[in-house]
Amino acid sequence: MKPIYFLLLLSFVFSASYGQQPLYYRQTITIDTSTNKEELLDRARLWFTSNFTSSKEVIQVADRQYGELVCRGVIPYSSNVFEQSSATKGQISFDVKIYFKTGRYKYEFTNFRHEGIGGYEYFSGAEDNKYPPTSFGLLTTDTLIPKERFNRAIDYKWQNKVWNDLKMVAGLRCYELVELLKKQMLLPAPARKENW
């Protein structure tokens, strides 16, 4: 009988950890098979410089030899959940990794993290009360905010609304960026001028 309980416990732990998978978007795309990885990297760099304009958004790695581009992006966030929205105002940072081989590339958008920089005040009688910014941290594929990150001082339903709004905002921005990347990857990069 004990082995059955052990197997049930093990399956529960596995399913709980599986459900808390970080939010990600990834796809491998094949294009013209004669296009080498260096050319594809140049095209992706143009995409990045055209679409990532904040000083917080940077290229961290651009390796022509291995065919790899690693970038850091930021999505400004203003909550669509109006109740207490100023407390969650902030940003969603994320990583973009693009790998290149001749005729194809693979992109990954990962590590989405919400950081609240807002906060709000309210007045109750003669007292001024301030709430600090509310951050949700690493976004996962869970439909409900993970229990270990649930803040008992804040309404659970409200936290779930914001949690899903954060993922929707991140998903919409990633969809937009991916469509722009696909278009850019079909256009030849300008010739590199080594002598200037």
Image: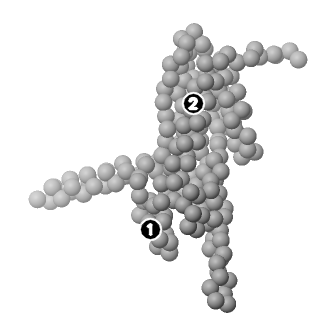
The first of marks 2 and 1 along the sequence is 1
Residue 75: where, in percent of width, then height? 63, 47
- Asked which secondary structure carries label 2, the reply is helix
Residue 120: where, in percent of width, then height? 65, 71
Other residues around mark 2 within 10 Å, as few (<14) / some (14–19) / many (≥20): few
Kind of residue sitting beneath label 2: Glu
Residue 161: where, in percent of width, then height? 48, 60
Kind of residue sitting beneath label 1: Tyr
The residue located at (48%, 46%) in the rendering is 23
Q: Which residue is mark 2?
A: 179
Q: Is residue 44 left or right of residue 156?
A: right
Considering every residue shown, the one lying at the far top of the view is 34
Q: Quadrant of the C terminus?
A: top right
The residue located at (54%, 31%) in the rendering is 107
Q: Which mark is residue 107?
A: none
Find residue 130 and report its image quarter.
bottom right
Find residue 49 and report its image quarter.
top right
Q: Which residue is mark 1?
A: 156
**118 above or below 174?**
below
Say which of 99 and 180 sits in front: 180
* Mark 2 → mark 1, Cα distance in angstroms: 35 Å
Q: How many marks?
A: 2
Q: Quadrant of the N terminus?
A: bottom left
The residue located at (65%, 42%) in the rendering is 72
**61 above or below 4?**
above
